[in-house]
Image: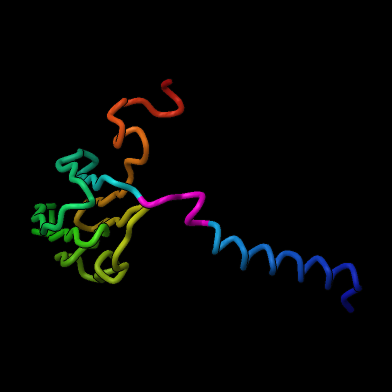
Amino acid sequence: MATLLDKLLFLLLTIFAVLSFFFVGELFPSGTLVTININNKAVYKLPLNKDRVVKVSGPLGDSFVEIKNGKARMRSSPCPQQICVRQGWINRGAIACLPNKVLVAVSGYEQHVHGSGYDAVTQ
């Protein structure tokens, strides 16, 4: 049977887990740059604030990446399970289409905004 200490620990961990969802946006702010990679090679670096649809050709065929209203998504892809398409809109993080070897990553915080080209590791 669970002791009082076990119940208290469970309650604290549950509260911490719920609160962490609210602070993720502060820890990982929205990006300003969309990088599209095919076969681990960057083919596009686009601003997140300009709406467009980009066609990228992977091993399975053409994927379409849409950038709109400060977010990006995989609009369509020839992959069989469509996991990348179902992921929806992102303004941070990445969308990976593994079968078609396409990666859409939203990043570019302060170093791209100010144009310094350095990050915390290389400074």
Residue 60 % position (x, y): 12, 58
Query: Residue 4 vs residue 114: left or right?
Result: right
Residue 122, compared with residue 32, is above or below; it is above
Image quarter in which the N terminus is found: bottom right
Query: Residue 82 vs residue 30: left or right?
Result: left
Q: Give the range drawn in magenta.
A: 24-30
Residue 68 covered by magenta stretch: no
Query: Residue 12 vs residue 103: left or right?
Result: right
Image quarter in which the C terminus is found: top left
Front residue of 41/13: it is 13
Residue at the image position 16 percent from the left and 67 percent from the top: 76
Name of the residue lying farthest toward the bottom: 1
Q: Quadrant of residue 16?
A: bottom right
Residue 44 % position (x, y): 15, 43
Residue 113 % position (x, y): 30, 37
Residue 91 % position (x, y): 33, 57
Name of the residue lying farthest toward the front: 114
Residue at the image position 27 percent from the left and 64 percent from the top: 84
